[in-house]
Image (cartoon, grey):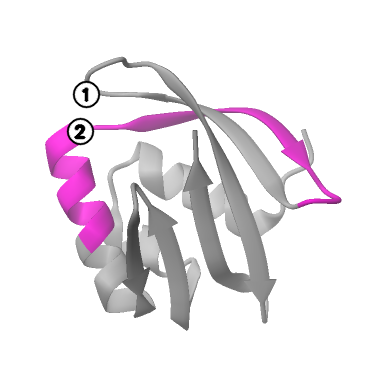
Amino acid sequence: MNLPNIISKLVKAQNEFDSHAYADCFTETAVVFDEGKTHNGKTEIQNWIDTANKEYKASMKTLDYSETDHVLSAEISGTFPGSPVTLKYHFEFSEGLIGSLKITG
């Protein structure tokens, strides 16, 4: 699977539960949409993923990536009900970083 470098960094950061490295994959003004909530900017994104990491201990196993649509399918395993689940990560990029991420089931 040919993942953009920034997505590989994001997956690595998630699997190492490194919220700082995860947030560094995003632009300063990035937006993340997950579980009906919007997280604006790197600080909110870092706080969101840090809380999620502590609560769910979620790791990512990449399954598929559409270079055309910029959508990553990944199996997410952790300490949450229904684990594992397959989620889709819809990316928009800006200046080599992630400008927008929407996570769907």
Tell me the kind of residue under disc 1: Phe
Q: Give me the residue at 40% from left, 49% from top.
A: 13
Q: Quadrant of residue 48?
A: bottom left
User: Which residue is label 2 attached to?
Assistant: 56
Residue 90 image offset from top left, x and y in percent: 61, 52
Q: Which residues are magenta?
A: 48-69
| Position in image of residue 41 (x %, y %) | 36, 79
Q: Quadrant of residue 45?
A: bottom left
Q: Residues within 10 Å of mark 2 (few under 14, many from 20)?
A: some
Q: Do the residues bearing badges 2 and 1 touch, measured as CB atoms within 8 Å?
A: yes
Q: Earlier in the sequence, mark 2 or mark 1?
A: 2
Q: Find out whether residue 57 is within the magenta segment.
A: yes
Query: The N terminus is located in which quarter?
Result: top right
Name the element at disc 2.
helix
Q: From the top left corner, tell me how far across and down residue 66 is, in percent.
A: 79, 42
> Which residue, given by chain and number where applicable, does mark 1 sit on?
80
Q: Residues within 10 Å of mark 1 (few under 14, many from 20)?
A: few
Q: Is residue 28 above or below residue 18?
A: below
Q: Is residue 49 above or below residue 41?
A: above
x 34%, y 47%: residue? 35
Q: Magenta stretch: residue 37 in it?
A: no
> Cα distance, mark 2 to mark 1?
6 Å
- Viewer-nearest residue: 36 or 82: 36
Q: Amino acid at mark 2?
A: Tyr
> Circle 1 sits in a helix, a strand or a loop, which is it?
loop
